[in-house]
Image (cartoon, rainbow, N blue to C red):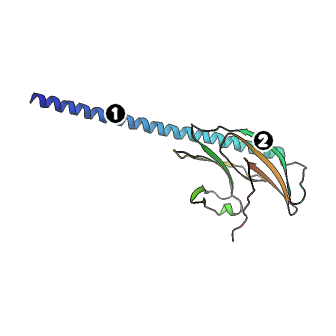
Amino acid sequence: MKGVSKFVEFVITIALSVLILTILGSLLISYYSTTLKENLRRELKDVALLISNSILRLYESSKNSEVFPKPNQSILLSSLKLELPERVSNRRYEVLIVSKTGVWGILESLKVDNQSLITIHEPGKVLILARTLEDPKVEVKVEVPNLDAYLQGKTQGGETYLYYYRHNFNSTLYDRILLGQQDFWVQIEEVS
């Protein structure tokens, strides 16, 4: 019986050691995950606030320009270079500017090729959405004050530009602020 009690004592010791190591491991993983998400949220908010402040600076410097384009033409009034981080907490990310005017005010979500691009919850506002492209998925929204310019754009960090355009469409002047390189401008007014 003496050998059996030593064996039982050994098994109990090993089982308790494994249990303690499992609990410590799960606590460390939980702490790491929570800390990582908070760091991501903080860094994404910093990027979104930097873009928001840059938009306001660009708007203030260009809104009163006396330059007017010819009918059905556009003119670049100014641009601003932004040095954004390539990654946040070693994760890839993207920043989108969403102007929720026109149809955006009633659109709840947008999917292209079965991939959710955006979900909108507060109609009538302009938002900067910064979100990670890798796990853990974290999204930060920063509201931009109402501006008398249409905002749109998307970037994935690094060296990025903000552009302030004025275009004359059918003798009506429109101002646009674009984030990143845009191949075309989109402003959906209605869906029928």
Quarter where residue 16 is shown: top left
Mark 2, secondary structure of its residue: strand
Quarter where residue 72 is shown: bottom right
For the residues bearing labels 1 and 2, Cβ distance under 8 angstroms: no
Tell me how many marks there are: 2
Q: In this view, does 135 lie above or below 166?
A: above
Quarter where residue 26 is shown: top left
Residue at image mark 2:
80
Give me the residue at 67% from left, 60% from top.
Answer: 104
Q: Which mark is residue 21?
A: 1
In the figure, is residue 136 to the left or right of 161?
A: left
In x, y percent, where is residue 3?
12, 28
Q: Which sits earlier in the primary sequence, circle 1 or circle 2?
A: 1
Q: At label 2, which amino acid type do we have? A: Leu
Viewer-proximal residue, 72 or 21?
A: 72
In x, y percent, where is residue 181?
73, 48
Give me the C-alpha separation between circle 1 and circle 2: 53 Å
In x, y percent, where is residue 123?
65, 59
In x, y percent, where is residue 88?
60, 38
